[in-house]
Image (tube, helix red, strand yellow):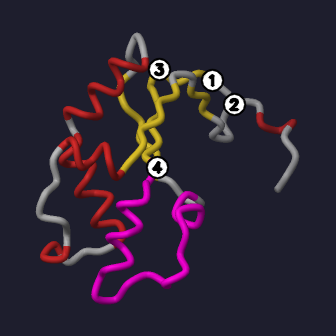
Amino acid sequence: MHEVNRCVVILKAKQPFLDWLLKLPEPVPADMTLQEIHDDHTALLIPDFEDNDTARRFIYKNYALLFEQELESWWTDEKDWPKKRTLAVFKEWFDVEVYSFVLDFDGKHSLQHLAEY
């Protein structure tokens, strides 16, 4: 393992995102929960920043691209996407978690001691 000089950001959908999914022409199952959405978050590798506040500012400067990526990962027909996709809406729809310590566990660095899965 070796440390990667990057930060990881996890985008976690909030209730308004689920509400949008449930209103789509071919919605997700009516009993879908946030927990089910949270079973597979989007993780982003971003530049290494001095602190988490700076990393969040980076995410918020790039929110439009990230917002569209999250919508498209669930529904590709843009006509059904919310028309209002401001930073304020992004913050209502997603929590942003920042992690500054990233280890690369890629199999090239002494993994012979790891248990098989």
Q: Picture coordinates of residue 99 (x, y %)?
A: 52, 28
Comes first in the chain, label 4 or label 3: 3
Q: Which mark is residue 2?
A: 1
58, above or below 21, in the image:
above
Query: What range is drawn magenta here?
Result: 12-38
Residue at the (27%, 47%) spot, across then down? 90
Q: Which mark is residue 12?
A: 4
* Nearest to viewer (mark 2 / mark 3): 3
Instruction: Sort mark 4 into few (<14), some (14-19) or many (20+) by Cα contacts within 10 Å.
Output: some
Q: Quadrant of residue 26?
A: bottom left
Image marks 2 and 1: residues in contact by CB distance under 8 Å: yes
Q: Picture coordinates of residue 25 (x, y %)?
A: 28, 88
Near-viewer residue (23 or 72): 23
Q: Which mark is residue 5?
A: 3
Near-viewer residue (115 or 35): 35
**Residue 17 located within the stretch drawn in magenta:** yes
Disc 3 versus disc 1: distance between alpha carbons?
A: 10 Å
